[in-house]
Amino acid sequence: MGKNAPAAPKLHLTSRNLGIGISEKNREAIVQGLSRLLADTYTLYLTTHNFHWNVTGPMFNTLHLMFMSQYNELWNAVDPIAERIRALGYSAPGSYSAFGQLTKLPDAPTEPPAAEDMIRILVQGNEAVAATARELLPLVEKAGDQPTTDLLSARMDIHEKSAWMLRSMLGE
């Protein structure tokens, strides 16, 4: 997503007057952040899966298995994020167009990079997703949205750990 990227897609409110103790204004702001987290997570999933398919070289088996473990975890992460958006009374974004407008991650390279470059790209991607979750945390805590706080905490832990493991493959 660059400077000339189109505006984020419009949110679609599906439930008004939810009696869950979070104002509509706060729910909207939280959903905007969760939509970015969903888009970042899906984009990282797609890149990780792409690298799983296309990795080559002496680290092939190790990376092929590691990338598979990571893309499976990412795939399983998108549903709880989207369901939290729904629980807050909004439709979850779910198109490549919407994700392209919402994510801060670049698309996967059109030509598969070398294995070590794949690792570096995934380190940056995991760190970026952790940062997206962390940026939303103060608002979520202020709104008293414990389920979203728990979700964000879990996502930060997973992405920071994944980035560490990937960096370790590079000896960094």
Image (cartoon, rainbow, N blue to C red):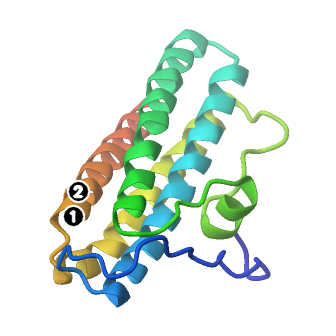
Q: Is residue 170 visible?
A: no
* Residue displayed at 32% across by 68% down: 134
Tell whether 50 sits left or right of 155: right
Marks 1 and 2, Cα distance to the nearest angstrom?
6 Å
Q: Considering the numbered disc 2 on the image, is that residue within a helix, a strand or a loop? A: helix
Point out which mark residue 153 bears.
Answer: 2
Q: Position of residue 26 (x, y in %)?
A: 32, 85
Residue 25 appears in which quarter of the rendering? bottom left
* Residue displayed at 52% across by 64% down: 91
Return the residue nearer the eye: 63 or 95. Answer: 95
Of the residues shown, which amino acid type is indicated by label 1?
Thr
- The relative height of residue 159 versus residue 105 in the rendered view (above or below) is above
* Residue displayed at 41% across by 72% down: 15
Q: Position of residue 39 (x, y in %)?
A: 57, 58
User: Which residue is denoted by mark 1 in the rendering?
Assistant: 149
Q: Considering the numbered disc 1 on the image, is that residue within a helix, a strand or a loop? A: helix
Image quarter of the N terminus? bottom right
Tell whether 95 sits left or right of 130: right
Q: Are marks 1 and 2 in contact (CB under 8 Å)?
A: yes
- Few, some or many C-alpha atoms within 10 Å of disc 1 (few <14, some 14-19, many ≥20)? many
